Image: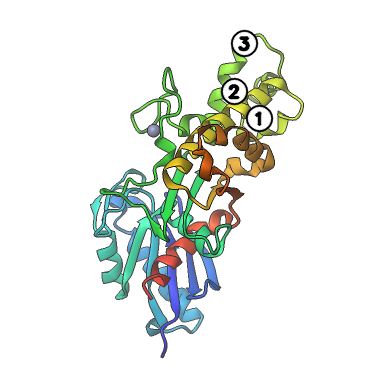
Amino acid sequence: MEKKLIFSIDLGGTTSKLAIMTLTGGVIKKWEIPTNKEENGKFIVPNIFRSFEATATMLNLKKDQFLGVGMGAPGPVLKDGSISKAVNLGWMDYPLKQELEQTFSLPAYVANDANCAALGEMWQGAGKGLSNLVCITLGTGVGGGIIVDGQIVNGTSGGGGEIGHMTVQHHDGFSCNCGKSGCLETVASATGVVNLTMEKLNSEKMTILRDIYEREGHLTAKHVFDAAKEDEIAREVVDQVGYYLGYALGTLSTILNPEAFIISGGVSRAGNTLLDAINKYVDQFAFPPTSKDTKLLLASLGNDAGIFGAGFLVKQQS
Ligand SMILES: [Zn+2]
């Protein structure tokens, strides 16, 4: 029987997305299970396998129809498919590829989750048909994935493409989880947008954001982008976010000359308000002869980018 199915996994700290896919990117079945992190994450792989087996049986699929298993995992992935450190899963020097291969008795391929999302957008999303692109996920943090000539830039120890930790505030920046301060993540993630806004609330200027903060006890990035049409402080924050992202993307454009930047994550729901703010500044920092060749696009796969990318890890070996 011809092997043409893929089992793909987007491993998350709370839930894991699972899918059975075809080599051409068709989704046969997609579901989620909770991630059991007890005892340093030793149940994670066996639980996923049991869920996969039960679903395959229910769909009347045989293991010899599967080419392999692909997984996107949070944390840096080394060349041998091991994870050096995934704090929220309890994994330290965890031989993930090996565990998957032993448990599933199938070839397994592993990549960092942000890199997987980038591969997913290249295979079936906004970057379909492209082979040089940079994906930026603006969520609780800022994730990045760089693809050059169809290959993820993984780096020596799995830290390639950590765009969220480019320093964009060179003095007095907000401190970042990574140990530095002034990282892109501290000003362009959902939390970062709120960081910038809270700073402005200290001024005397009138703003509806202060009213929202006093009424609801907190602010979100959505409050800020929604208010930007009519509120000067909100507009100033959006402009700052655009500046920092414009700086980061313009610099990446100079180094990589990609076909596209693809923006995803919760903050990207601001759509054109965000894209316009980035476009206002990106050319100031990009190499002029080639900057016009780079498109700025919104991602199209949403939360499914990771499972498509995990599927692509298997597909690209076939
Ligand atoms: Zn950082």
Q: In this view of the protein, can residue 251 be seen by the observer?
A: yes
Q: Please tell me whether residue 145 is drawn above or below residue 307 in the rendered image.
A: above
User: Which of the four quarters of the rendered structure image does ligand 1 lie in?
Assistant: top left
Residue 316 is labelled as none
Residue 164 percent across, percent down from the top left = 44, 38
Q: In this view of the protein, can residue 307 be seen by the observer?
A: no
Contact? badges 2 and 1 (CB < 8 Å)? yes
Residue 203 is labelled as 3
Residue found at the far bottom of this picture: 1
Of the residues shown, which amino acid type is indicated by label 3? Ser
- SS category of the residue bearing label 2: helix
Residue at mark 2 to residue at mark 3: CA–CA distance: 11 Å
Q: Earlier in the sequence, mark 2 or mark 1?
A: 2
Q: Please tell me whether residue 268 is drawn above or below residue 41 in the rendered image.
A: above
Residue found at the far top of this picture: 204
Of the residues shown, which amino acid type is indicated by label 1? Val
- SS category of the residue bearing label 3: loop
Quarter location, residue 174: top left
- Number of numbered callouts drawn: 3
Q: Which of marks 3 and 1 is nearer the N terminus?
A: 3
Q: Which of marks 2 and 3 is nearer the N terminus?
A: 2
- SS category of the residue bearing label 1: helix
Residue 166 percent across, percent down from the top left = 41, 34
Quarter the N terminus occupies: bottom left
Quarter the C terminus occupies: bottom left
Residue 102 percent across, percent down from the top left = 26, 70
Residue 224 is labelled as 1
Contact? badges 2 and 3 (CB < 8 Å)? no
Position of residue 161 in the picture relative to residue 58 (left or right): left
> Which residue lies under the disc numbered 2?
197
